[in-house]
Image: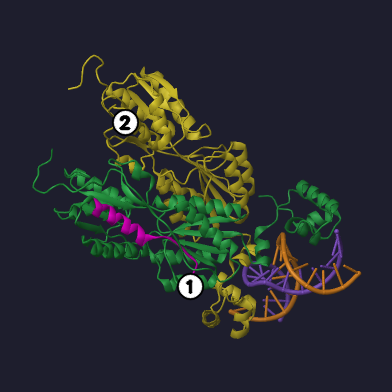
Chain colours: A green, B yellow, C orange, D purple
DNA sequence: GTGAAAGCGCTAACAT
DNA sequence: ATGTTAGCGCTTTCAC
C-alpha cells in the first residue's frame, strides 16, 4: 500500500493551489478548462485518488447508505437488496448491507456500528420497537421498509390487502376454516397479516385460528406440519418459507397438497415456483420497494416527507390451493 | 440530526485536556482511573460518541472490511457471509457486503467504490483476472476466497478433490459416461472442477463430456436439461442450482432421477436437501471459510503469509444418484 | 499522568 | 478563476 498522493502533491506538480485541485474533482465547472485538464493529467500521473475519509470529515457525508435486513437468508430480501443496490449505485452511493438475524438486540448492535459511518439507513423488516427506530432516526435519516412507523418515511406492501386476498381466494374455493401460521412476534408484517386474516374471516364467515409463532423458515414450516390439527383444510402461512416447509411436512407424513390441505404463502420468493405443487402466494413489488427506499433516503435532504407509501400486492395462484375435499367422500 | 458532542466539549466540561478524553476511549490504561471515570461520566451525560470518520482520518483505519461475492442470490455464499460476519464482529469490525453480479466489470466498479473506505477485502468467487485482483491487493490487503491466486492469501475448498470424489462415486455406481455441466467461464472453481473431472475420468475409464457453459442458476440447469443428449446417464453439474434446475427439467419432460439419470452438484446448499430426490453434492466448509478469510485479513498487519489454504470437501450422498439403468431392460 | 500543539487530507469561505 | 486560510474531530509526539 504505497503512500497515496494528495491534493498537495498534485498542486505542487501542476503549479496550482491545493484548492484548485480540490475543485477540479469535487466541483468541476468552477475551474478553468485548461487548468482542470492539466490538474487531471498530473493527478493521473501521480495516481491521485481523492481520500474519501478526509472528504467525509469536512463534508459530513460518506456516500454510504446502509440497508439492514432481518435475515439475509430470506430470499424475499433478494430483490429488495438488488433494487436498493441499483438505486444506491445510480445515486453514486455505496450500499452497506447488514443482517440483523431476526433479533432486535443484534439489530441494535449492528446499528451502533454502522450508523456513524453512513449518510442514511434503510431498515427492512426491522425487529426493533418503534421507539428504538425513532431513536436511530434521530441520528441519521431512516427509511422504514416493510413496515409503517408513524412520522417516519415508510414503504410497505399492503399486508392487510394481501392477507385479505389470500383469504378471499380460499373462501372462494369453498374453505370455511382456515389456519394462520404466525411468524416472528417482532414482525410488524406478521401482526398486520394476522389481523387482516382475522377480520376478513369474520366478514366472510370463515373460521380462523392462529397457530405458532414459528420461525420464519422452512424448518419452522415443517414443525408447523407436526402440530397442524388433523381437520385443517386450508392454511395461510406467514411467508413462503414456512409455507414450503409446511407442504413438505404434510407430504412427508402422507398428506397431499392441495387435495388434503390448501396452502398459501407470502412474498412469492423464487422457490415458490420451484416446489411441487407450485405455491399460491401473495406477491409484493420487492425490487421496486428496495429502489424507492434508497431513492427516498438520498433525495431527502432533511425535509418533511409525505405519508407512508403502501404498495399493492398481487395474489399469484399456483397449484397449492384447491377446493376442500368433501369430508365423507374417499379420494378418486 | 442534533450536533454531536466532541472531545472538546467533553474536555471542557470535565476540566481536562482534549487529548485526555481521546486517550480515555482509544487508549484506556494510559489515563488515571479517576480521571477516566469522570471523563466517561461527562461523556455519557453529553451523549458523546467518538467520530469514526475523524478517527479514521488520523489512524488510517476505518474498521470496515469488505466481502464481495459473485452473486448474493447464490445460497452457497450464505454461510460464507455468516462466517465472515461473525469473524468481523468478533474482531470489532463492520462488514461491508457487496455483490459483483457475476461480472468482472461490475466487480471492478464495486471495488473502486469500496476500496477507499475499507481496511481490507475478501473476494469470494471473484470473476476478475488474477492481474486485476493483484492490482486491488496493491491498494488494500486482500484475501481470496474459493480461488487460489499465487502470492495472495487464498482460501479455497479442494475443488479438484471434490470433483474427483463426485466422479468416483458415479463410477462406483457403474456409470461409464458422465457429462459435466460447465458454469461461468470466469469462474476459477469451474475450471478446477472440469479439469479434475476430465482427469479422473481418464484414470477411471469413464468417458467425460463437457456441456455449456450455463448460467450458474436454476434456470441455467433447466436449459441444460433441454440440451442434454438423450443417452446421458450421469451428470456432474457446476453447482447445486444448476443441478436442481437440471433435475426439474428432466422431470418435466418425463424423465426420472436417478432412474434415468444420476445428478451430482456442488456446494450443498440448503435446498439440496429440500428437493426431491435429495441432491447428491460436494460440500465445502463454507462458514469456516468465511470466518477464516476475515480472520486472515484482520490479523494480517502487512505480513507475509503462508501458502494457499485448501480445505477438504465431503461428498454428501442423497437420492439423486443411483446405478445406471440397464439399457435393454424396461423399468420394474 | 496530563497538557499543548501539530497535523491527517480535504473543503469552504473569503480575498484577490 | 484561483489562491489563502481556517478548520472538520481526532490521534499523537513531545514536554512538563
Residue A196: where, in percent of width, then height?
31, 63
Q: Position of residue B245 (x, y in %)?
A: 37, 34
Q: Chain of mark 2?
A: B
Quarter of the image holding residue A28? bottom right
Q: Quadrant of residue D14?
A: bottom right
* Nearest to the observer: residue B189 or residue A148: A148
Quadrant that contains the C terminus of chain A? top left
Q: Is residue A290 above or below residue B21?
A: above
Residue B1 visible: yes
Q: Which of B142 and B323 lies nearest the eye of the viewer?
A: B323
Against A302, residue A30 (above or below) is above
Residue at the extreme top: B328
Mark 1: secondary structure: loop
Looking at the image, residue D7 sits to the left or right of residue A183; the answer is right
Report, in whole angstroms, how far the alpha carbon at label 2 lies from the one at label 1: 51 Å
The spot of residue A105 in percent (x, y) is 40, 67
Who's the residue at 43% across and 33% down the image? B220
> Counting other residues with Cα less than 10 Å from the Cα at mark 2, is it few (<14), some (14-19), or many (20 or more)?
few
Range shown magenta: A151-172
* Magenta-colored segment: predominant secondary structure: helix
- Identify the disc placed on residue B232: none
| A168 lies left or right of B137 | left
Residue in the image at 62% along x and 37% along y: B131
* Image height of C1 relative to A152, above or below: below
Q: Please tell me the numbered disc located at residue A151.
A: 1
| Mark linked to residue B252 | 2
Say few, some or many: other residues with alpha carbon within 10 Å of mark 1 (under 14 / 14 to 19 / 20 or more).
few
Question: Does residue B27 appear in the picture of this structure?
Answer: no
Q: Which chain's residue wears label 1? A: A
Q: Position of residue B211 (x, y in %)?
A: 44, 24
A113 falls in the magenta region: no
Above or below, B34 against A277 in this view is below
Amino acid at each position: 500500500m504505497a503512500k497515496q498522493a494528495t491534493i498537495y502533491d498534485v498542486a505542487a506538480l501542476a503549479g496550482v493551489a491545493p484548492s484548485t485541485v480540490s475543485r477540479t474533482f469535487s466541483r468541476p465547472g468552477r475551474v478553468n478548462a485548461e487548468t482542470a485538464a492539466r490538474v487531471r493529467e498530473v493527478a493521473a500521473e501521480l495516481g491521485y485518488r481523492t481520500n474519501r475519509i478526509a472528504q467525509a470529515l469536512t463534508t459530513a457525508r460518506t456516500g454510504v447508505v446502509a440497508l439492514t435486513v432481518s435475515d439475509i437468508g430470506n430470499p424475499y430480501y433478494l430483490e429488495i437488496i438488488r433494487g436498493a443496490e441499483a438505486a444506491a449505485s445510480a445515486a453514486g452511493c455505496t450500499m452497506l448491507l447488514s443482517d440483523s438475524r431476526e433479533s432486535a438486540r443484534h439489530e441494535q448492535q449492528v446499528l451502533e456500528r454502522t450508523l456513524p459511518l453512513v449518510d442514511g439507513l434503510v431498515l427492512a423488516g426491522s425487529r426493533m420497537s418503534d421507539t428504538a427506530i425513532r431513536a436511530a432516526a434521530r441520528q441519521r435519516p431512516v427509511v422504514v421498509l416493510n413496515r409503517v412507523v408513524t412520522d417516519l418515511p415508510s414503504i410497505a406492501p399492503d399486508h392487510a390487502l394481501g392477507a385479505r386476498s389470500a383469504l378471499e381466494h380460499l373462501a372462494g374455493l369453498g374453505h370455511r376454516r382456515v389456519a394462520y401460521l404466525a411468524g416472528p412476534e417482532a414482525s410488524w408484517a406478521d401482526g398486520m397479516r394476522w389481523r387482516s386474516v382475522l377480520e376478513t374471516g369474520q366478514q366472510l364467515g370463515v373460521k380462523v385460528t392462529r397457530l405458532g409463532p414459528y420461525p420464519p423458515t422452512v424448518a419452522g414450516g415443517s414443525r408447523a406440519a407436526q402440530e397442524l390439527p388433523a381437520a385443517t383444510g386450508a392454511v395461510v402461512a406467514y411467508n413462503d418459507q414456512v409455507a414450503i416447509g409446511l407442504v413438505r411436512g404434510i407430504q412427508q407424513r402422507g398428506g397431499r397438497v392441495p387435495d388434503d390441505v390448501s396452502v398459501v404463502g407470502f412474498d412469492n420468493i423464487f422457490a415458490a415456483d420451484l416446489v411441487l405443487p407450485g405455491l399460491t402466494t401473495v406477491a409484493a413489488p420487492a425490487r421496486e420497494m428496495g429502489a424507492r427506499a434508497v431513492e427516498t433516503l438520498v433525495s431527502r435532504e432533511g425535509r418533511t416527507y409525505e405519508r407512508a407509501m403502501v404498495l399493492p400486492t398481487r395474489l399469484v395462484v399456483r397449484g397449492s390451493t384447491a377446493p376442500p375435499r368433501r369430508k365423507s367422500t374417499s379420494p378418486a
